[in-house]
Amino acid sequence: MALSAGDVPTMYAVLVNSLSADEAARRPAEAALAQCETRPGFCSCLLEIISARGLACREDVRLLATVYFKNSINRYWRHRRDSYGISNEEKDHLRKNLLLNIREENSQIALQLAVLISKIARLDYPKEWSDLLSVLAQQLQSADVLASHRVFMVLFRTLKELSTKRLAVDQKNYAEITGHLFEYTWNLWKSDVQTILQNLSMLLQRNDMDSILEQSNDLILICDRWLLCLKIIRQLIFSGYASDSRTALEVWQVREVCPTVLTAIKSLLPYYDSFKDKQAKLWDFAKRACIKLMKVLVTLHGRHPYSFVHQTVLPAIVDFCLNMITSPEQAGTSFEEFLIQSMVLVKSVLECKEYRPSPTGRVIHENAQPLSLEQRKKNFAAVASDMLKVVLPGDRVMLLCNILVRRYFIYTAKDLEEWSENPESFHHEQNLVQWTEIKRPCAEALFIVIFEKYRELLAPVVVSVLREAMAVSPPQETDVTAGMLLKDAAYTAAGHVYYELSNYLNFNEWFHGSLSIEVSNHHPNMRIIRRKIALLLGQWISEIKGDTRKLVYHALVGLLQDNDIAVRLAACSSLCYLFQESSFSELDLFECLPTCWTMSFKLIEDVQEFDSKVQVLNFISVLLEHAGDKIIPFASQLSQFFQMIWDESAGESLLQIQLLTALKTFVSSLGFQSPLSYHVLIPILQNGVNIDSPDALNLLEDSVLLWEATLSNAPSIVPQLLDLFPYLVGIVNRSFDHLEVTIKIIEDYAIFGGSEFLKSHGASLANIIDTIIGNVNDKGLLTSLPIVDLLIQIFPLEAPPLMSSALQKLIFISLSQDDGQNPSRTAVRASSGAILARLLVMNTNFSAQLLSEPPLLASIQQAGIAVSNNMLISLIDMWIDKVDDANATQQKEYAMALSVVLTLQVPQVIDKLDDILSVCTTVIIGSREVKTIDDTSGDITSSSWIGNDCSGYSNTSSKELRKRQVKDSDPIKQASLENVLRGNLKACAALHGDAAFNAAISRIHPSAFAQLQQALNTA
C-alpha cells in the first residue's frame, strides 16, 4: 500500500524513535522503516520531512531522513526484478522538489542533499532529467551567497558522479557540459579570489576581525564557494577532455587556468603566516587553499602534460616549486604540507614520460600537411625538454640534490622524539609508500627521480656528502651530533642510488672499514645509524660479494636482536631481500635459522601495529619457503607460534589472511611431514572454509588455498581431512569464485582418498558436480570437465550413477549445435563428448541405461536438438564429426568408444562402419607419428587407478608423481587401440553376420582400406 502526505507525521515519529537511546523504542522503529522503504511514496514522505524547516522539525531527524532517502536511491531508483522500485510519477515529483530545496542552511543536510541529487543525476541525466543543469544554472544567478554556495556543492557532486560514466556517449555529454559551465565558473572563481584577497587584506589591518566574522558569515561562505568552484574547474578540465598524452591536442583551459592558479598561490601564501596566531578560520582557509591549489596543478599536469608545455605554465610553475623547496624562508613560508605538494609536482614533471626527448629530435613542419600524432608528441617533448634545461641547469640540480640530502633527509628533534615515543609508528611512517603524505619520504622520492635523470652529474655529489659525513662522524661516536645526523642522511641517499654508487664505492671496504663497526656500536643513540645500515644492507644486496655476504647475514641477524624495535623491523625487511635474492647461500641461511626463528617469534610478540606483524609474518614465510624440509626440527615450535598468533588475531581478518598465507608456505615446506601441524591446521581450516563462519567473507579465499595445499602435501587423507569435504558444497553453492581451486581439491580427494572418500561423501560430490555443470559458463566448464573425466576414470562403476544428472547435461552439450565463432563452445563439446566416450568404454551397461531413458530423449527433442530415437547413434555421429576438434587424448577416447560400439547390438552401426574405421585408423596412425609427445592438455583427464601407499615418493613433488602414476595407469591410455579394434572387428562380424560385415567392408575406399590394414599391422 502506497504512503501519502497523510503518513508524514507518522513517518516523522518513526524517525524520531529510531534515534532514541532506548532500545525498546529504537528497534521497532528501525523495523518499521525497513518495511516502509519498499512501499511507494516512502521517498516522497522523507522529502516532506527534509523540507520542513523550523522549530517544529528536529535537525537530526531531517538529517536521518536524507540518509534514508539516499539509501533508497541506491536500492530502488532503478527497476529490478527483485524490487518494486520507485514509480516514474514519484521520480518526477522528487526530482522537481529536490531542486527547490537546495538552499539548505544546515551544512550536513546540504551535503547529503547534494550527494543524493548527484546519485539520481548519474542514473537519469540527460534522458529523464534533461533540465537539471539549466535549473541549477538559473539558481546560480542569485545574489544570495548561501544559495550559490549550495548550488555549487550540488554541481560539484553531480559532475563528479557523471565523470565516472565511461561510455562514449556519456563522455560526449560531459564535454558539452564543460563547454556550458566552464566560462561562468571560471569567471566567478576569478572574481571571488579578488574579493577574498581584498577582504583578507582589510581584515589583517583590523583588530576586531573576530567580531566582524561573527557578524557576517558571507566571507567564509565565499571562501568555501571559491574552493568548490576550484574543484569544479579541475573536474571539468580533467574529465571534459581526453588526456592530451593520447591526443597531443592542447587543452586551452590549462594555459588559461594554471598561471592564474599560480598567481593565487603566491598571493595567498603570505596569509598562512599572517593569520597563524590571529584568526583560526582564516588561517585554516589559507592553508587549505594553498594545498588545494597546488594539488590542482599536480592533477592537471598528470592529465594534460602537453598542455603544460607553455612558457607561462611549465617553467614558471617548476621554478616556483624549486624556489619553495630550496629556499622556503625566502618564499615566506616553511609550510610542510605545501612543500610536499611542491616536491610532488617537481617529481611528476621530471619523471613525466611524455617529456622524454625523442632521439630524432623535433619535427620541422616543411609542408602544408598537418603533423601526425607522433610528430606532435615529439615536438611537445622537445620543447618541454628545452624548458627544463633552462629552469634546471646543472648548478641548480646539484643545489637541489644537496638541499634534499642535507636539509630534508636530516632528522629533527621532533622526529627523534617521535621515534623514542613510538618506534614502530616512526619506522612505518618513513616508508616510501607514504611518500605523498610525509615530508622526508617525499624528499627521498624526489631525490631518487632527480638522481635517475642526472645520475652522472649527481653521483659525485652524493659520494662527496657521504665521505664528508663519515669524516665528521666516526664509527664509535655515541652523541647525537649534526655529523651523525648528516651520516644518516648520506646513508639514506647512498641506499637509494646503490646502482650508480657501486662505480664509485667499494662495498667491501666500506663495510669492513665503517659499517661493521657501526653495527657493533650498541649505544642507544647509535640506533639512528644501526637502523639505516640495516636498510642499506638490503638495498646494496646485489653489490655484496664473496665472504662479505656471510658477514652481512650475521650482522643483520644481530640487528634482529637490537633493543630498538625500529632497528629490528629494518633488519627483518632487509633479511627478506637477502634470502629472496637469487645468489643467496642456503648454507648461511641454515646457520642463521635457529636465531631467526627465535628473534622473529620474540619480535612479533613485542610489536603492536598491524604493519609490523605483517612484516614479520612475511619474513617468516620467506624463511619457510627457502628452508624447505630443514624446518622439520622446528615444526612444533612453529605450530605453537601460529596457534598463538591466530588466537591473538581473532577479529583481525587482514592479519589472519597473512597468517593463512604463511601457514600455506609452512605446510608446503613440511611436505609429507605436514601432519605434524594438523592439531593447529585443521581447526583453522574448519573455521575458514565454513561459509557460516562470521569471518568467511574475508578468510574464505585464503582458507580454500590452504586447504588445497594441505591435501597436496598430505601423505594420506586422514579422517579429519575427510570430514572437511562437505564444506565444499556450501562454498560452491555460494559462488564459483573459487572454482579452479575447488576442482583441485576434488582431484586431491579423488586421487588420495580413494573408495573411502567416495563412500563417505559421494552425495556431496554429486551435488557439487551437478551445481557446477549446470551453472558455469564455457570457461568454467573447461576448468571443471576434467574432474568428471577423472572420477569416471578412478571409479568407473561407482561414480557414474552418482553423477547421472550431470552426465545428462553433458549429453545435452555434446548434441547441441556449435557456434563456429566460439572456440570455447567447440572445446566444451569436444570435452563433453570425450567424457561420454570414456563412460561407454569403462561402464558400458550404465552408459546404455543413461542413453535409453525416455525423459532424457524427450527433453532433448523439446529443446529443439535434432537427435535420432537412439541417442547412441547421435553420439556416434558427434564423435565422428568432432574428432578433429579434440586433443590427442580425447581422440583416443573417441576411437575407443567407437571401437566398443562395434560390439553392441545396434543395427545402424554396420552402416557407419566406414566412418568409424576411418576415425580409428586416423587416431592409430596419428598416435604413432607423435608417440613421443605426452599430451597433457587435458591434465587430469587420463587417470584411473589410485593406490594409498605413497611412501616411496619424495615430498618435493609428491603430488605430481602420484598424479603421473594415476595418469599413466589409465586403462584407455594403456590399451592398444590396434588390438582392441582388431578384436572388436571380429566380434562385429560375428554379431552382424559375415555377409553384412563384408558388404560394409567392401564399401570402404581402397586407399582407406589399405591404411586400415597398415594400422592393424595386417598388410
Image (tube, grey):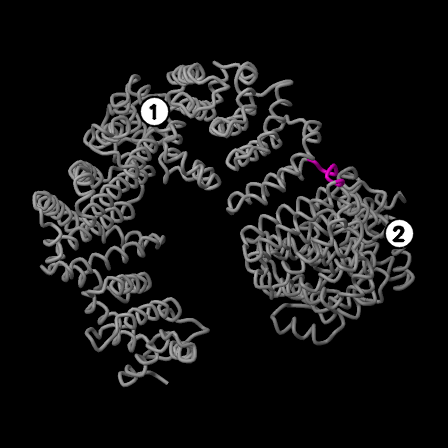
In the displayed structure, 1007 sits above or below 755; it is above
Residue that appears at 76% across and 49% down: 676
Q: Amino acid at mark 2?
A: Arg
Residue 629 falls within the magenta-colored stretch: yes
Q: What number of labels is visible?
A: 2
Label 2 SS: helix
For the N terminus, which image quadrant? Answer: bottom left
Foreground pick, 650 / 69: 650
The numbered dot on residue 982 is 2
Q: Label 1: few (<14), some or many (≥20) within 10 Å?
A: some
Left or right position of 926 against 330: right
Magenta segment range?
627-633
Which residue is identified by label 1? 357
In the displayed structure, 727 sits above or below 891; it is below
Coordinates of residue 451 in the picture (x, y in percent)? 39, 23
Residue that appears at 79% across and 56% down: 718
Residue 85 falls within the magenta-colored stretch: no
In the displayed structure, 724 sits above or below 241; it is below
